[in-house]
Amino acid sequence: MININVALDPQLDGPKDSKVCSLISHVMECEGISHADLSLIFGNDNLLADLKKKFFDLDHYTDVIAFRINDYDENNVEGEIYISLPRAKENAIKYGQSFQKELGRLIIHGSLHLLGYKDDTKKNELEMRNKEDSYLEQVNWKKLYG
């Protein structure tokens, strides 16, 4: 069973929990994961910048951070995904796509990181981008807010 807890900064307008959970579950199941305990936290730029500084010693804004809590060689996945909704909105404008599509991409991106995918090289980044594109084609990201 895939369990997903969604938390939202009360000052922000977030997507529908059921749609977000469906998207993450789809990615996990397609990647062969049937057991997961995950948290998805929608926050602001300051929350993610603080996490980036604390855990990566980098001082800048970011759109998504994922933490795998258990070992990657375990069959179940335990982890947390943090997404900055303001950064997602800014990225959507920057990349000329809808906010919902960008948010879907970030949710998928964080999910893939929990599964061990990395974007630390051009090759790995391209592999992740191709996976993101594939999953975006498979799901209805247009309904994340409705």
Image (cartoon, rainbow, N blue to C red):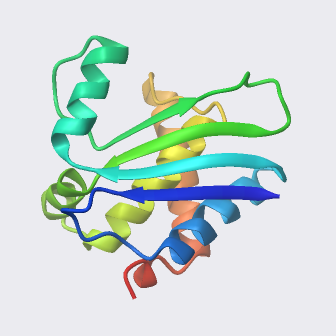
> Looking at the rendering, which quadrant does residue 48 occupy?
top left
> Looking at the rendering, which quadrant does residue 8 occupy?
bottom left
Q: Nearer the viewer, residue 38 or 86?
A: 38
Q: Which image quarter is the C terminus in?
A: bottom left
- Given the current orientation, which residue lies at the most extreme front position? 10
- Given the current orientation, which residue lies at the most extreme top position? 57
The image shows residue 55 at horizontal and vertical percentages of 37, 16
Relative height, residue 24 to residue 59 (above, below): below
What residue sits 73% from the left and 25% below the top? 72
The image shows residue 98 at horizontal and vertical percentages of 26, 74
What residue sits 58% from the left and 75% below the top? 139
Please tell me how many numbered marks the rendered image carries.
Answer: 0
The image shows residue 75 at horizontal and vertical percentages of 86, 36
Horizontal side of 41 relative to 132 (left or right) equals: left
Relative height, residue 55 to residue 47 (above, below): above
Q: Which image quarter is the N terminus in?
A: bottom right
Relative height, residue 65 to residue 98 (above, below): above
Q: Nearer the viewer, residue 83 or 117?
A: 83
Horizontal side of 6 relative to 63 (left or right) equals: right
- Given the current orientation, which residue lies at the most extreme bottom position? 146
Q: Nearer the viewer, residue 128 or 25?
A: 25
Horizontal side of 130 relative to 88 (left or right) equals: right
The image shows residue 49 at horizontal and vertical percentages of 21, 30
> Looking at the rendering, which quadrant does residue 54 occupy?
top left
What residue sits 69% from the left and 46% below the top? 37
Relative height, residue 89 to residue 50 (above, below): below
What residue sits 25% from the left and 69% below the top? 97
